[in-house]
Image (tube, rainbow, N blue to C red):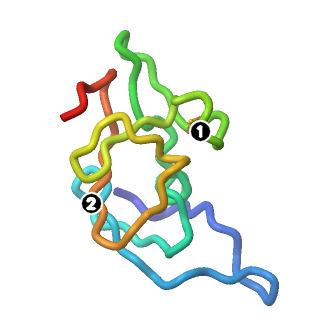
Amino acid sequence: MTNEFVARLPLDENITRGAQIWVEINGARVQGFEGESVAAILMAENLSALRTTQNGEPRGVYCGMGVCFDCLVVVDDIPNTRACMTWATDGMKISTQEGLKASN
Ligand code: FES
């Protein structure tokens, strides 16, 4: 996973970040910060297509507030997790998702 484009605001006296955490996205170790949603980390890594529909069409963060369900990903083996409504935690394993998955 490339880290060339990082979509985070630059820090200044008005912007602070939580402690550094590490998550895994599709098998790659990626830096995040406490207080970020899974969607924020995915977008910071320039990942815009987070899942596909059952017809294979890409979907990503759209509403950013838990309404559209276009940001579904697999988090720690739990499919259909809304990335925009899930706080990232250290060691979390995130993967993009194809279609809808049956919950375990
Ligand atoms: S972006 Fe709409 S539910 Fe997550």
Among all residues in the image, which is located at the extreme left?
Answer: 104
Residue at left 32%, top 55%? Answer: 25
Q: Nearer the viewer, residue 2 or 19?
A: 19
Among all residues in the image, which is located at the extreme front?
Answer: 104
Q: Position of residue 99 (x, y in %)?
A: 33, 21
- Residue 92 vertical placement versus 21 (above, below): above
In screen coordinates, is 73 left or right of 91? Answer: right
The local crowd at label 2, few if under 14, some if 14 to 19, many if 20 or more residues have their Cα within 10 Å, is: few
In screen coordinates, is 9 left or right of 25? Answer: right
Q: Position of residue 27 (x, y in %)?
A: 22, 55
Q: From the image, tell me which residue sits under label 1.
A: 66
Q: Nearer the viewer, residue 1 or 9?
A: 9
Q: From the image, tell me which residue sits under label 2.
A: 28
Amino acid type at mark 1 = Gly
Q: Which corner quadrant holds the N terminus?
A: bottom left
In the image, the residue with mark 1 has its CB under 8 Å from the nearest atom of ligand 1: yes
- Residue 38 vertical placement versus 62 (above, below): below
Is label 2 in a helix, a strand or a loop?
A: strand
Is label 1 in a helix, a strand or a loop?
A: loop
